[in-house]
Image (cartoon, rainbow, N blue to C red):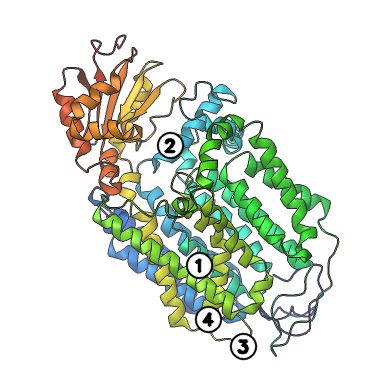
Amino acid sequence: MFSRPGATAPPTEVVGGPAPARPGRRDPARRPPGPLPRILLPAALVLWLLSLRHVRLDRMGDLGLLQVLPALYWVALALLLLGFVTLLRQGTRLGNAWPAGYVLGLIAMIHATPSLLYPALRYSWAWKHVAVVDAMLRHNGTVPNAQGLEIYNQWPGFFQLNVLLLRVTGHSSALGYAVWGPVIFNVLLIPPLLLLFSSVTRDRRLVWGAVWIFFSASWVGQDYFSPQAFAFVLYVTVLAMVVRRLQRQQAPVGASSSGSPAPPARSDAGGWPWRRLVLVLLLEAAIVSSHQLTPVMLIVTLFALALPRRNRRVVLPVLAGALIMTVGWDTTVAWPYVSANLHDFLSALARPDDNAVAGLAGLGAAAPGQVLVAWVDRVMSAGILLLAIGGFVRRPWVRRTGLPAAAVAPGLLLVANTYGGEMIFRVYLFALPAIAFLAATLVLRPGPRSRLRGSLVLLVACGLVGGLLFGYDSKESMNYFTSDEVTATRELVDSAPPGARIVSVTGNLPGDELRYDQHQQLVLTDGTLGQRQLLVSDPAAALAQADAGFSGPAYLILTRGQSAECYLTGVLPADTVPRVKAAADASPELTPVYRGPDADVYRYLPSTSAGAP
């Protein structure tokens, strides 16, 4: 099934799987799994669903969901891991249906758990993106008076696609399906990952093992409803199509069962069929119009793939298309943002050491559990990198696949910019598809005569999934929003008149931007260092300053999620929100308009906010 069309298969077995079966015979590379994997998958899924009935979200603390998931959940996850490793022991005779079921089961247990448990969309940035879709739907395109969210007008591809979807389906908001964003984007990643890995090997065990490792190590959390998640799926798709085309023009990867080089296949030296090249260019256009960073990552990766002369017939047309479209877009549609930030970007080039370590420091004031999580993430990331390096060293055939270049190339951007302190995490994510495959070649020992050491594979699988859960689920006490928080925010947004100012301690709110073109958001943690110090030392003075000189109606909203963010991240002392609440209750300039168990809303009185109702 994974043999490359257009190439004459060698008569010997190659690393990556046996030669295709002769016509008219049953494919010997497939056989049904044994009884244990067929039992463990449905058992794990049933136990997982049953375990969700016993989760107490109000008990989340430093480690988020990890603290409240019941023992039955961990039993279900253990059964899933055991079943998948047992399935891999079939070696090169592995089929596709059952591995796909196990990978989908892993995605469900990790990413569907919050969607099923939470009463509302998780993560404040997902709410922001829903608000942008809503605003573009109302304005039939560019949103005027974007109030600090102008950047989305300049990279609107993802949002306009959602507007089109809403118009076609007749729905009024993306909120309903945005809840399932992490599940949807991870499922959409499966086909391009399969295409990428099956382009360089015919060993189904290796292909599915690499897919499993990718999802087990993808802890960065960029799979929520967002343009970067959409663009990343397209990035992996373009990478897979390029690598696939490269392999069609080269000899089969690997060595024969005797250890000698595999016989060369017929080279398809015609470059790209025009229809396929047009498809690749359309995917690149969607990337360029949707996200700032992903096109740059794609250009750097394609440049690395184009370094070997034998690759240039395939890579250069795709690289030229990405480069021309990115430069054209950034100098026209996105020029307002690019020109405003060009100085900062050029300055960052002179500080590569600062860029490389951004995001790894400054944990001194974070919650103790988050310090532990940071070290777990680092150890897991270093571990999979070491496995990938081991695969590169021990499996010489992978060096001709292009995947080592795809693993290294994103790292070049570490010296270019901090990307708001997130560059190191984005580099890890974009390198992960290639890293996962290189790691799989070491752990799974590809080849027709290799034997899978189940205990070692199970140990690696448990370590990766454990690290994933620490990185992905540990901040859920701030990513999760209660019904009361959603109600308070929605009532504030709906009742505040146009031109009103909405003040909050942090930006961790469920939907305060839902009418961002009509209201002004003031987040106190986004202020200067002096303003933040005043907020800590004298909350009453900081609240008065937040409304000073503003003539329109103004409101203050304080929520459980803001308090959780202060505690977990250390952006402010953990008691900041309760102290601000006490100051607001005591202030003659503020009056409460909403009280709830998890949220409080205050209105600035007309004496200090002229024109307030």
Sequence-first disc among 2 and 4: 4
Residue under numbered circle 2: 127
In the rendered structure, which disc, 2 or 1, sits on the residue that comes first in sequence?
2
Three-letter amino acid code of the residue under disc 2: Trp
The residue type indicated by label 4 comes to Arg
- The dot on residue 449 is 3
Binning the other alpha carbons within 10 Å of mark 2 as few (below 14), some (14 to 19) or many (20 upward) gives: many
Q: Name the residue under label 1.
A: 213
Please say whether residue 505 is visible from this viewpoint: no
Which residue lies most toward the bottom here?
A: 258
Vertical order, 307 against 292 (above or below): below
* Residue at 44% from the left image edge and 40% from the top image edge: 126
Asked if the residue under mark 4 is in contact with the one under mark 3, i.e. CB atoms within 8 Å, the reply is no
Could you say where residue 566 lies in the image, as x and y percent from the top left?
A: 27, 43
Residue identified by numbered label 4: 89
Distance from the alpha carbon under mark 4 to that under mark 1: 16 Å
Q: Which of marks 3 and 4 is nearer the N terminus?
A: 4
Camera-side mark, 2 or 4 = 2
Of the pair 179 and 587, the residue shown nearer to us: 587
SS for callout 3 = loop
Q: In this rendering, would 90 be left or right of 131?
A: right
